Amino acid sequence: MLNLLRVDIKRYCITKRFWLLALGSAALTPFLVGLFLFILAQATGDSYQVSLAVFTVYSSMAAILLAMLITSLLHEEVGEGIVRNKLISGQKRSHIFLSYCLLHALLALLLQLIALLGACILPLLLGAVWNLQGSELIRLTAISALASMAVSLFFTALYFCFCTSKAAFILPGAVAIIMKVAMTVIMDALYTESGIPKVSGATLKIYKGIDRFLPFAHLTDLPRWDNASYFWGSGVLILLSLTAGLLVFSRKDLK
Amino acid sequence: MEYIFKADNLCKYYGSFKALEAVNMAVPQGSIYGFVGKNGAGKTTLMRLMCGLQFPSAGSYELFGKKNTDTALPPLRKRIGAVVEAPAIYKDLSAQDNLKLQCLNLGLPDYGDIPGLLKLVGLEQAGKKKAGKFSLGMKQRLGIAVALCGHPDFLVLDEPTNGLDPQGIVEMRELLLKLNREQGITLLISSHILEELSKLATHYGFIDGGRILREMSAQELERECRKCVRMKVEDTRILARIMEGLGLEYKIIDQKLADVYGSLNFSETAARFAEAGCVIFSMEEHDESLEAFFISLVGGDRHA
């Protein structure tokens, strides 16, 4: 499997399009935020303060960006017969699937780090004043990285479960967008200006459960729960994605 | 005789559609097995099963002496090289980079074979040109070079001459013969160009409607594609009467043309035709082609 991972990493590394897509995805959001804050500071004449919220800009877009990136890369791999060739070359289906999962988890981590770096450096270059603690930044980065890795594994598994149909090309992106909308609705309902949630009873419990354990929610807003909740939430999604992906892909007829 | 591949009542169903139905076939070691069938006959499905891309619905097969259910089979697949449907290549990489990745994929220790492989398939001049910009023929050659990485014992090629120009077809034929004769690679080739296949194959498998109609060696096929005399006469109805009188088998092609099988005494035949008042325009020896044989086997439809 490590051999396969080497092949995939090498293949991605020597592909210009991959770097364009990956770096573009990770660097665009902090850049846009930095630019926005810079323009704001110029307009008001004040130096602006960098708060933790700047670092959530990439995370809040991560699920959609990862869905698009992973789908685009996998679609090419499957469409051009690369996955087929790996099977013909005697690689086990489980190894092929796990190698892509690991690769995309690493990709998610890399993008998260690039986005973090961009969000750290850019405001400083623009003359911003820091207004945050290092420990907060580390915690936010760790939670976001874990959640984006879990989400990337989920998208990889989703693609492989439907890899012989056109649904594979649409599903990850569609799920990411639906989740983004759903998470926004849930956050709005849970965290109001008055501090009183807009929902109550079972709905409130479900919303809180989602906010606490679902990695899509972890990418939407600043962390409010304990570390264990984030760990278990992402862990369970990773486990479910791997199990479902392995079960389906190991029995799937490929073209 | 040792066999690289053996199918035993192999079936593959897609819902209610029977893509393969009780297929029994055997590919002898060292042979060039020509796999002949119409579009949708089941050739590619069988190749997919063989390469482990799909699973049988019923029946089984053996590859390198291991059953498809044997856990020892997947590693043995490294001894197969295959180009099924389209060549599996990275379009944004050069030919050399494609081969490097395949070497890595197979866990080969170095890239020493790459220049030789590129030369073998005639892509040594491709340089840094990306595979996506290759012509169809160049992509086909690169696909074969990728399949040849790691010195496979068994090469499965689905329509290898697709997209090649006439010179490319000749070069491909020479390459495949070289691989078989010099490196002892067993080849399974499906092709629509049956005459081209007949210049290569040592064994044949004819498939139609998911069933193997016939398996035979090239020698057997040669015997079956028997010689006949093609006669152009004034009226083939009179020819039919005369041939029935002589007890000879014949096949009417049109009102003036017919094939006559068996030993024909030209003088006696000419005398009979003169007696019946029917003019013979020409008589010439004629071989039944592989295509004609295939059509007679599947019964009609000229779409091989």
Image (tube, coloured by chain):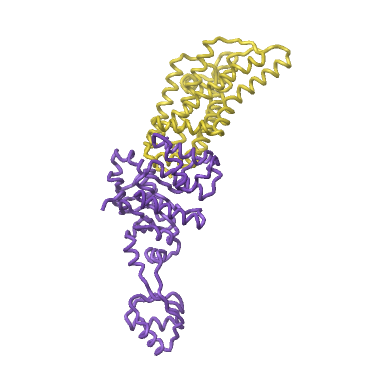
Q: Is residue A57 left or right of residue B253?
A: right
User: What residue is shown at x 41% (from left), y 72% (from top)?
Assistant: B286
Q: Nearer the viewer, residue B190 or B99?
A: B99
Q: Quadrant of the C terminus of chain A?
A: top left
Image coordinates for residue B212, horizontal then vertical, percent? 34, 57
Which quadrant of the view contains residue A4? Answer: top left
Question: Residue A160's spot in the image, x, y percent?
Answer: 44, 36
From where the camera sits, is residue A45 visible?
Answer: yes
Count of marks, rendered view: 0
In the picture, measured across the screen, residue A123 lies left or right of residue B105, that is right
**Chain B, chosen colour in render:** purple
Toward the viewer: A139 or B138?
B138
Q: In the displayed structure, does residue B71 sit left or right of residue A45?
A: left
Q: Residue furthest left?
A: B1
Q: Quadrant of the N terminus of chain A?
A: top left
What shade has chain A been given? Answer: yellow
Q: Residue at x 38, y 37 (%)?
A: A91
Q: Is residue B37 above or below residue A26?
A: below
A234 to B291, vertically: above or below: above
Instruction: Judge whether B273 appears above or below B293 on screen.
Output: below
* Image coords of residue B159 (percent x, y): 44, 53
Which one is in front, A18 or A232?
A18
Residue B12 placed where, x, y %?
A: 36, 49
Residue at the location (36% across, 55% down)?
B33
Q: What residue appears at the point 45 percent right and 40 percent down from the top-left corner?
A: B114
Work out whether residue A202 can be spotted.
no
